[in-house]
Image (cartoon, rainbow, N blue to C red):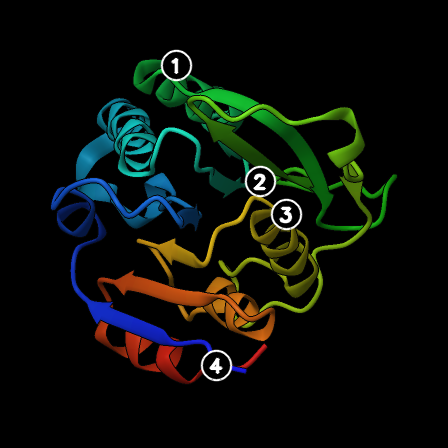
Amino acid sequence: MREPTRVVHHGDGLAFLARGRLPDDHAIVTSLPDHSELPELGIAAWRQWFIDTVALVCRSVADDAVAVFYQTDVKYDGRWIDKSHLVMSGADTAGSYPLWHKIACRVPPGTITFGRPAYAHMICVSRTRRLAPGASTPDVLPALGTMSWSRAMGTAVCEAIVRFVASTGAHTIVDPFCGMGSVLAAANAQGLDAIGVELSRRRASKARKHVA
């Protein structure tokens, strides 16, 4: 059996996506940066950047392929920023539609949290693919799983997403904001090739070595 490959580019994820549409057997799984990671934009400009980036991600995959977003809401100035709304806005702009919207518990249910909610969003979109009822999977994940760093996708989330992506016939998962490579490692562990892009040289180096 062929060993799955992993390529991690140190660079700008937006520039990578701007090269053109990915091959038909590629899917994107990613988590876009929070406003705290792009403070020079300010909140209003970051929101528009987020929506525009989601639209670019959606346009970068083939019509029947999927893009999956993992995002956690955040409180700013006493108000919630609902990132699921921002993802849906970007998907609408690109002509993509949600196949599912799942919730992953960040802490046990009933726990009070501050600054960020007790859950994270997992949203899968596509332009033309439809999801048959028999292909449904649980809508609530009880835990994120182990996290390699504070902004990582947990192992349980990565495994659930990669299993679904594999079921669509995808052979390669691309993460243009790959961080330390949790999604890439999960893809390789399930036999899929992986391509990551990361602006931080240090994190890109770790992403090349990360093991699920």
Mark 1 sits on what residue? Answer: 92
Residue type at mark 2: give it: Gly
Residue at 36% over, 22% down: 90
Judging depth in this view, the residue of 156 and 111 nearest the camera is 156
Q: Residue 118: tell me if it is visible.
A: no
Q: CA distance from mark 1 to mark 2?
A: 28 Å
Q: Earlier in the sequence, mark 1 or mark 2?
A: 1
Residue type at mark 4: give it: Arg
Residue at 49% over, 40% down: 69
Mark 3 sits on what residue? Answer: 164
Mark 4 sits on what residue? Answer: 2
Q: CA distance from mark 3 to mark 4?
A: 21 Å
The numbered disc on residue 115 is 2
Spot occupied by residue 64 in the image (x, y as percentages of width and height): 43, 31
Judging depth in this view, the residue of 172 and 197 nearest the camera is 172
| Closer mark to the observer between disc 3 and disc 4 | 4
